[in-house]
Amino acid sequence: MRLVIANCSIDYAGRLSAHLPLARRLLMVKNDGSLLVHSDGGSYKPLNWMSPPCTLAVAEPDERQREAGVVELWKVTHQKTADMLIVSIHDIEHDSRHELGVDPGLQKDGVEAHLQKLLAEQIERLGEGYSLVRREYMTAIGPVDILARDGSGASVAVELKRRGDIDGVEQLTRYLELMNRDPLLAPVTGVFAAQEIKPQARTLAEDRGIRCVLLDYDEMRGIDDGHSRLF
């Protein structure tokens, strides 16, 4: 991972356009190719970002840009959509690289672990003809909660959460990108399953072709039969 603290402005061009004026920011370039732009606030959420697959190219500023104080241009281009994140750097205060190694992944709490077990046993909740391949299917960047096959025999990666938010969608996106490079698995589609899915997460998932499934934990445990309720 590369960490850069720089005075910079940011422009995003593509399906949406956005501009961040000149300010001191943290630029995080991850080993998977993604770039995230952070300020000293806003908790974990970046101000802007580009997710993989993308490429980062460093370019020299033109005369007009140099006169404005730009010393270096980063152009991060998404390989599928051609969206571009342009970082205009005026000066760099810190630049370091760190090898973090393979992350073991988030350890699920008791409810999420039980949801995984229940869904593996009740895999037909994902659709008619679904079958379980295995739980905790290991990839180079961590375990996928459930690997299944749909009615046509195609591979399906399932990410499980109690409360589904954007981070969970990003996590599943990384798994899918990696798994679709494996000719023995591809094509692999994704299912984001949770007891509750935030609207922003649902929008992002659907935009990436990931299906969202709501799970009723009590019903799956046999405590609350949703089909026999009067109201």
Image (cartoon, rainbow, N blue to C red):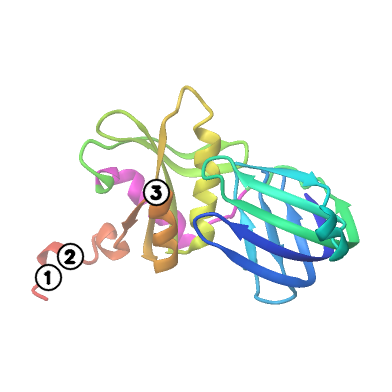
Q: CA distance from mark 2 to mark 1?
A: 6 Å
> Circle 3 sits on which residue?
210
At which x and y percent is residue 78? 59, 45
User: Is the residue under label 3 in contact with that under label 2 (CB below 8 Å)?
Assistant: no
Amino acid on which the number 2 mark rests in the picture: Gly
Q: CA distance from mark 1 to mark 3?
A: 30 Å
> Circle 2 sits on which residue?
226
Indicate left or right for 129 with 110 as reference.
Answer: left
> Circle 1 sits on which residue?
229
Return the residue nearer the eye: 22 or 45: 22
- Local crowd at mark 2 within 10 Å, few (<14), some, or many (≥20)? few
SS class, disc 1:
loop
Q: Residue at x 83, y 48 (%)?
A: 60
User: From what the image shows, is residue 111 above or below residue 138?
Assistant: below
Q: Residue at x 87, y 57 (%)?
A: 71
Report which quarter residue 190 is drawn in: top left
